[in-house]
Image (cartoon, grey):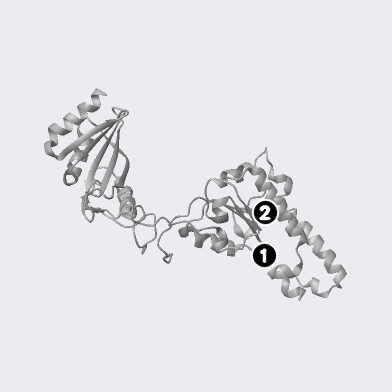
Amino acid sequence: MSDLNAIVDILKGEFGDAVLGHHEFRGQTSVVVAKDRIADVATFCRDDGRLGFNMLTDLTAVDRTPRTPRFDVVYNLYSFPHNRRLRLKAPVEENDTVPTVEGVWKAANWLEREVYDLFGIVFDGHSDLRRILLWDGYVGHPLRKDYPLEGIPQKVVYR
Amino acid sequence: MGVETKLPPVLVTNLEKLVGWARKNSIWPATFGLACCALEMMVASSASYDIARFGAEVFRPSPRQSDLMIVAGTVTKKMAAMVQKIYRQMPEPKWVVAYGTCACSGGIFNVYNTVQGVDQFLPVDVYVPGCPPRPEQLLAALIKLQDKIAREKFSDRPDTAAAAG
C-alpha cells in the first residue's frame, strides 16, 4: 500500500543510513534497522504524528544460523490513530547487546525478558533483565537452533 | 475407624462392598485443569454430557474436600511440584485420572519444559488418551474408575490397610 511506502520514506528521511532495507509481503511492511539506533527509531515511530505507532504488539527474535549476524530482533508495532501495522527488524550478532526500548513502550519490559530467556540476547539499559518463563538457574537458551529439542538434563529449582 | 478389625471376615467383605458402592457413586473431583483439556472437562460437567448422573457434579476447588484429581492438561516442570503438593493435600481415599495425552505421556510436547506424563510423580488410576479426549471419554474413564473402586479391598488403601492386617 502506498502509505506504507510513505512510512519507509519518512524513516529514511529521518535516519538515513540506519535504515538498512525494507520489504513487503502481502500487505505487511518490514523495515530493517541498524540495532544501535533502534531506541531512537522506536521513539520516533511512537512520537511522530504521521506514524503514531503507540503500541508494541510483540517483541521477539529469530535465530538465523548459519547466517551472520545470527539473530534478528523483531518489533511488531501497531498504530491506533491510523490503524496500521509495521515491523522493525534489527540484526544482532551473537554475544552482542541491543539497546532496550523499555522507555518507549512499557510492554517491552517482559517481552525483552522473554527474548533474553529463550535466546540469550542481552538488552542494554533494561531495568530487570532476568529469566521469565524458565526457572532461575536454568542452563541454556532453548529457542536457539543449536539447543536440543528435549532439553538438557538438569535439576528444577523451586523457590 | 478400626471397626473393620473387630468384625468376622464375612462381614468385612460385605462392608467392603458397601463402602465401595458408597465411594464410587459420590466421587468429588478436584479439578486440576491446566490447559485445553480443562475445557473438555467443563463441558463434561455441563448439560449435554452431565457428569452429575454419576454423582460427580461437585467439583471442589479445595483438594481437602475432594477425592478424585483429574489432571487435565500439560504439566510443565515448573508446575510439577505444585501438582504434587495439591495431591498430597488430598485426604485418603484418593484417585487420579490422567486426562489427555499430555497428562498421560507428555503428548506432542517432548520438549525441554514438559513433564513426560504425570505418572512420573503421581500414582495414576485411569489414563484417558486423546487430544483432547471427548467428554464421553471422561465419562467412560469415570465408569472404569467406579468399577475399580467397587473392587477395592480394605488392604488396598493405605488408611485401612493396617487395620485389615
Label 1 sits on a secondary structure element that is: loop
Disc 1 residue type (three-letter) = Glu
Residue at (76%, 66%) from the top-left corner? B153
- Quarter assignment of residue A120: bottom left
Q: Who's the residue at 82% across and 65% down the image?
A: B15
Disc 1 designates what residue? B92
Q: Along the horizontal axis of the image, is A63 left or right of B94?
A: left
**Rendering coords of residue A148 (x, y %):** 39, 57
Q: In the rendered structure, the residue with mark 2 lies on which chain?
A: B
Query: Does residue A34 appear left or right of residue A53 in this picture?
Result: left
Q: Is residue B69 above or below residue A3?
A: below
- On residue A151, the disc is none
Residue B95: horizontal and vertical position, in percent? 66, 59
Percent coordinates x, y for residue A135 in the rendering: 39, 60
For mark 2, what is the residue? B28
Q: Is residue B115 above or below residue A24?
A: below
Q: Quadrant of the C terminus of chain B?
A: bottom right
Q: Residue furthest top?
A: A2
Image quarter for residue A60? top left
Which of the two discs, 1 and 2, labels the residue nearer the N terminus?
A: 2
